[in-house]
Image: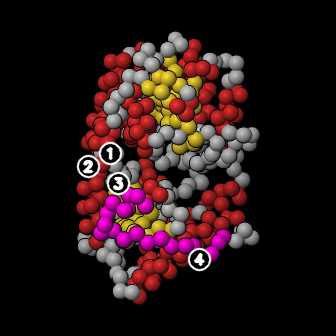
């Protein structure tokens, strides 16, 4: 059985419809957040509302005679906060994504855009830990995709964590043929055989994923290479997924204004969001792939690029170092150094044998540790261990 709030995407509904033995229940939030709530409590309030709404549905299910063997919940949104009260004897397996930290993580990583935080800013982040700690306390066991994510959580709980990635579907990726040329309709760019393509993928074009370093590297990259080199940037240009919104328009335009007149605009292409098949086609055509991030949750797009045998230039930050070993599965650069980024990308463009070696090594790592065919059996075994009471917090 799967529970989801109303408004769940049509894609999820389509996936669930493929499994006739799965019952999918939608529910409504019982109330809305109150704008007069203390700003430090608004995050907790929204999660408590979600938790109350989900628990109410489960209470009705229990009255109707349904008791699950195990509850699997994502802790980030609060839906599972009170399910241990409804089902006190049912083990809970919690997917733990990221623990908020006031220092030494993503919150104070970038002095240019994060600057000096007031004590109130720090207090707001600290208050957001409340629901996370509740989730940790009630979980029978936890799992998370990377070692870096596990290490963000309090040491007192880390012994009750398994590290298993969600899994990259290598079979689906291999089903997509590598094109030599194709048209990217959203940015009206025809990739030709003669082009050398540098790619970068981010959910939204924003500093959290290094858009400032990327865009500032463009003049250096073009100076070091001939006009056959084109940069294709995938991601939403008008929204922010993580961090603060741009003070003036979009982050993309903000940084492009900074380098105006110093680069050839015809060789830089913003592709927006792509359908999955088109994204994989682009990654397979890529001659070098850039991935930059604050110390934050690792993007699936990096692992998918590695599965496509892309030659990666990544930021020397956690958790990138977990998958990109310098000069083995890719190249590492200083997150804040646009010139170094351009130099290392150029190194790959000038050395296709090196690019092939790094790309093939990257694919081998994905196959060994991050492929869905490896991760899914581990996930299923973990569910069995927790459901049968073999694995639980001390």
- Residue depicted at 49% across the width and 39% down the height: 274
> Which is nearer the N-term, disc 2 or disc 1?
1
Disc 2 from disc 1: Cα separation: 10 Å
The residue tagged 1 is: 169
Is 183 placed above or below 67 here?
A: above
- Disc 3 vs disc 2: Cβ atoms closer than 8 Å? no
The residue tagged 3 is: 163
Region in magenta? 13-33
The residue tagged 4 is: 30
Q: Residue furthest bottom?
A: 63
Is 28 placed above or below 16 here?
A: below
> Which is nearer the N-term, disc 4 or disc 2?
4
The picture places residue 6, in percent across and down from the top left corner, at 52, 67
> Which is nearer the N-term, disc 3 or disc 2?
3
The picture places residue 29, in percent across and down from the top left corner, at 57, 73
Q: Nearer the viewer, mark 4 or mark 2?
A: 4
Disc 4 from disc 2: Cα separation: 40 Å
For residue 25, the mark is: none
Q: Is residue 210 visible?
A: no
Choose between 327 and 247: the one closer to the eye: 247
Query: Colour scheme used in the picture?
Result: secondary structure
Q: Is residue 342 visible?
A: yes
- Disc 4 vs disc 2: Cβ atoms closer than 8 Å? no
In magenta stretch: residue 22 = yes
- Disc 4 vs disc 1: Cβ atoms closer than 8 Å? no
Left or right: 267 with respect to 380?
A: right
Within 10 Å of the Cα at label 2, are there few (<14), some (14-19), or many (20+) other Cα atoms? some
- Residue depicted at 45% across the width and 19% down the height: 192
> Which is nearer the N-term, disc 3 or disc 4?
4
For residue 374, the mark is: 2
């Amino acid at each position: 059985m799967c529970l989801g709030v109303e408004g769940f995407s049509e894609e999820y509904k389509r996936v669930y419809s493929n499994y006739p033995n799965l019952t999918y229940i939608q529910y409504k939030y019982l109330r809305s957040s109150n704008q007069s709530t203390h700003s430090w409590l608004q995050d907790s309030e929204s999660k408590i509302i979600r938790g109350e709404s989900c628990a109410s549905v489960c209470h009705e299910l229990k009255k109707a005679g349904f008791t699950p063997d195990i509850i699997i919940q994502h802790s980030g949104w609060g839906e599972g906060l009170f399910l241990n009260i409804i089902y006190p004897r049912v083990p809970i397996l919690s997917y733990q994504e990221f623990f908020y930290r006031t220092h030494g993580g993503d919150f104070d990583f970038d002095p240019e855009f994060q600057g000096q935080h007031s004590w109130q800013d720090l207090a707001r982040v600290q208050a957001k830990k409340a629901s996370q700690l509740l989730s940790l306390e009630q979980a029978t066991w936890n799992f998370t995709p990377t070692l870096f994510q596990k290490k963000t959580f309090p040491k007192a709980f880390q012994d009750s964590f398994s590290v298993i990635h969600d899994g990259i579907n290598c079979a689906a990726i291999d089903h997509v043929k590598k094109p030599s040329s194709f048209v990217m309709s959203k940015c009206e760019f025809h990739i030709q055989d003669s082009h050398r393509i540098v790619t970068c993928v981010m959910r939204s074009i924003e500093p959290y994923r290094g858009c400032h370093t990327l865009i500032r590297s463009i003049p250096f990259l073009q100076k070091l290479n001939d006009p056959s080199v084109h940069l294709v940037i995938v991601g939403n240009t008008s929204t922010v997924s993580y961090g603060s919104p741009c003070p003036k328009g979009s982050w993309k335009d903000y940084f492009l204004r900074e380098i105006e007149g110093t680069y050839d605009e015809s060789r830089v292409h913003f592709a927006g969001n792509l359908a999955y098949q088109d994204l994989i086609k682009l990654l397979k055509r890529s001659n070098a792939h850039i991935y930059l991030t604050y110390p934050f949750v690792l993007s699936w797009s990096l692992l998918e690029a590695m599965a496509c045998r892309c030659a990666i230039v990544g930021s020397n930050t956690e958790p990138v170092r977990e998958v990109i070993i310098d000069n083995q599965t890719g190249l590492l650069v200083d997150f804040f150094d646009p010139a170094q980024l351009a130099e290392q990308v150029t190194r790959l463009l000038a050395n296709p044998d090196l690019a092939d070696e790094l790309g093939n090594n990257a694919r081998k790592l994905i196959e060994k540790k991050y492929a869905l065919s490896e991760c899914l059996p581990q996930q299923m075994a973990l569910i069995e261990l927790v459901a049968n009471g073999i694995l639980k917090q001390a």
